[in-house]
Amino acid sequence: MSNRNRFSRRTWIQWSCTAAAMPAVHSLGPLFGSSINEKIRIAAVGVTGRGGENLREVAHEEVTALADCDENLLAKGGAEYPRARRYVDWREMLEREEGKIDAVLVSTPDHNHAIVAATALRMGLPVYCEKPLTHTVHEARVLAELANERNVATQMGTQIHAGDNYRRVVELIRAGVIGDIREVHVWANAVYTGAKFNNQPKPAGLNWDVWLGPAPERPYSSDVHPFQWRKFWEYGNGTLGDFGCHYMDLVQWALELRAPEHVAATGPEVDAVSAPAWCEVHYRFPSRSELPELDLYWYDSGRTPPKLAELKEPILDLHGRPFSTTSGQWFIGSRGTILSNYGQRCVLLDDPAAELVVPQATIPSSIGHHREWLQAIRTGEATTCNFDYAGCLTETVCLGVASYRSGEAFSWDRDQLSTGSAKKAQQYIEKEYRAGWSL
């Protein structure tokens, strides 16, 4: 392994509200020592769609190697990086490029996230991985532990976390503007459902075995690749899997959440193949330090909190614009509520005579979600969605999926990764990989 991939320091920094109100972070050994102007050599797995967007965010570095199991997409995405070496199988890329790359960008379908990221982490390489971090709770725990052991810079791709709006909402909540918060509602309007396998001839140039990765062996289906895989349980987790990490991120950040103690999901009759037409989940989180117990409610596919309709129209954000309730978060406190979405926030105080005092901004603007990761590689500075933070967020999402698919509510034992007496739910905490693939 090149000296560029060796880290010298290993210090754990506990999360503190005084440290810019950021999530729990590691202090990392810098990759380049004093040569911070040296370009980072990046290898990417997945090069179009989100992969293409991620690559463009790091293109000012040195894009050294690209892997995509679809030769047509590899040619399309790789055209922007003519000097990068190309591979159809990411395993071959990581093996042959060892010592020639400094970091790995993972933009595959969800079911392959963990196996690619874990391989890179065991090589001592920093990793940026798209959300959700993994496909199961167990995989999320493995990646978080590996990142801690290897002491490398990690970042989960939930780019909205880098926006200023989320930071301002965190400050409002931390300042106690709406008092103690014991109830939060989160909803997203995207719909992923109706999945059906249809055995079709495999397109030329697609390595279907690599695309499947650890998923069960089955013939190619035209309704899966390149994007509709999110509808299928074997490859994604529906709307909750796609948007849970985006919208519940703000709640975890602002209210210092780690793991729920109870999970109960509802929805239409479970389909063995397809994600549902809608899903709702009730999470209960224990008290945290001075923060009280919290009930968190998730709604997707166009469903919204029933009480949302009781709010008086029009709802205006803090800039006087109509507030969009298509998707968002609703924090209910002892003195009022905060409504937020990706780009808006509004405060509704219970006392109409009370004056809203907006706290001074204390959380610095992000240098950019991808640049945080690159800077951490160079200097050892913190990332805001490292795999410890992102692992907890992903576990919460996957626990909701486990409750829905099993039809069981359960008490969650985070230390033991156990759903207790809910044996059906337990089978969705960890999945079996097909022969030839292992985490």
Image (spheres, helix red, strand yellow):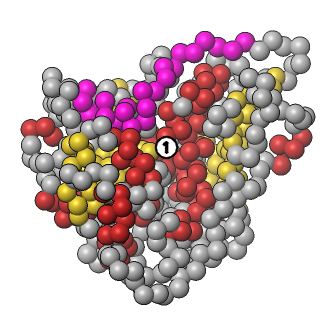
Q: Quadrant of the C terminus?
A: bottom left
Q: Residue at x 39, y 80 (%)?
A: 203
Q: Is residue 139 visible?
A: no
Q: Residue at x 89, y 13 (%)?
A: 353
Q: Residue at x 36, y 47 (%)?
A: 55
Using the rendered view, name the quadrant where residue 296 is placed.
top right
Query: What residue is shown with label 1?
Result: 158
Q: Is residue 40 visible?
A: yes
Q: Label 1: how many residues lie within 10 Å, few (<14), some (14-19) or many (20+)?
A: many
Give, as a single range, the part of the protein colored magenta: 357-379
Q: Is residue 313 left or right of residue 182?
A: right
x, y percent for residue 292: 65, 31
Q: Is residue 207 left or right of residue 179?
A: left
Query: Camera-side residue: 77 or 350?
Result: 77
112 in magenta: no
Query: Camera-side residue: 270 or 88?
Result: 88
375 in magenta: yes
Query: Camera-side residue: 216 or 256?
Result: 216
Q: Is residue 413 above or below residue 136?
A: above
Q: Is residue 217 left or right of residue 63?
A: right
Q: Is residue 14 left or right of residue 96?
A: right
Q: Residue at x 78, y 48 (%)?
A: 305
x, y percent for residue 173: 65, 24
